[in-house]
Amino acid sequence: MDVKWTRRGQLDGREQQVSSPQPPSAQKNSRGTRKLLSHTSTLDKTLLTISYTLHLLHSVLAKTPRLSVSRLTTSLTPLTAIFDDFRVFLRLWGLLGIYDWGVSTYLTPPENGIVRAITWGQVVACALYQVLENGAYLAGKGVLEWRKERIARAWIWSGRAWCAYVALELARLGYEWGQLKGQDLDGQRRKSMELEKSRLAEKQGEIIEKGELDLRMDKVEDEGLKKRWGKWYKEVGVNVAYAPMTVHYSLENGILGEGAIGGLGAMVGALSIGEAWKETA
């Protein structure tokens, strides 16, 4: 593994994920902050997709004998570095979003105790991650007077905080799976009972027809559950892709090469960029 790339690659490995589980804020003055941060998050996801695709492309070209020393291959290294650095610069303001998330959670906490505990754990993990990343980035630019050893430790521990967040997010998704599965089973049982009643009525010469309002409510409920499942699958895909990356950035020498990081990151971008632009529109 290219250790030098591993250390530099840490600059592009973190995406601010705090937007997905945020509850609506009860404070009106937080709406402008959230709107601004949503545009920043959309830009970050766009740059994420481009950056990881370039890393994947560079890895492929570097392993191709005729193209490994071409001008295109050598130029991709500084180009991806620009994207990586700019993404970390944009995340310097990430603490604003985390603060808003924490205030929202405090004012309107999730009713479910398990979800509430997971959410607070994620708030703390994201706050630690962002503080450590900001410190390491600014120290690397000479703004803070940190020793190289301290900067390296900050990058590693920020990666571990990110790893904790992803682990909690997967736990939340596991709990949500149980809830969605339960709703699916309830809906199937209800429809089965209604079908059985209809068959019994037909045998007795009666006809049972559902009203238009009931049919519309059933349709809305089915569509809502379908959308929730679609969102759940996307979030699972994103976090499953992030999981090995978080382990990679939690270790001093990492465990993944540039190609693996680029491929996993490109998958994250493909799953998240479309929804990000929809939220911005």
Image: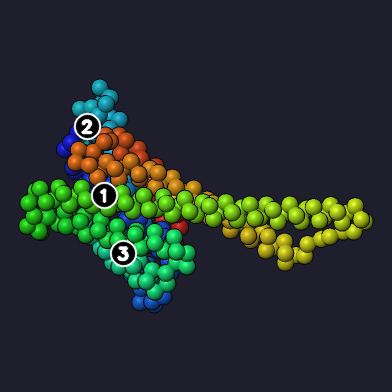
Where residue 267 is drawn, which disc sits there?
A: none
Residue holding disc 2: 1
Q: What is the x, y in percent for residue 69?
A: 20, 27
The mark nearer the N terminus, 3 or 2, is: 2
In which image quadrant can residue 137 be found? bottom left
Q: Secondary structure at mark 1?
A: helix
Please state if 227 lies on the left or on the right of 266 as rendered. right
Q: What is the x, y in percent for residue 7?
A: 18, 42
Q: Residues within 10 Å of mark 2 (few under 14, many from 20)?
A: few
Please state if 257 lies on the left or on the right of 116 as rendered. left
Where residue 160 is drawn, which disc sits there?
A: 1
Question: Residues under labels 3 and 2: Cα distance?
Answer: 34 Å
Mark toward the viewer: 1 or 3: 1
Q: Is residue 266 visible?
A: no
Relative to the observer, which residue lies in front, 279 or 240? 240
**Disc 1 to disc 2: CB gap under 8 Å:** no
Q: Is residue 103 visible?
A: yes
Relative to the observer, which residue lies in front, 46 or 13? 13
Q: What is the x, y in percent for residue 40?
A: 32, 60
Q: Is residue 79 above or below residue 139?
A: above
Question: Residues under labels 1 and 3: Cα distance?
Answer: 17 Å
Q: What is the x, y in percent for residue 243?
A: 35, 44
Q: Secondary structure at mark 3?
A: helix
**Disc 3 to disc 2: CB gap under 8 Å:** no
**Disc 1 to disc 3: CB gap under 8 Å:** no
Q: Residue at x 41, y 50 (%)?
A: 170
Relative to the observer, which residue lies in front, 199 or 222? 199
Where residue 98 is drawn, which disc sits there?
A: 3
Q: Is residue 165 above or below residue 5?
A: below
Q: How is the image coloured?
A: rainbow
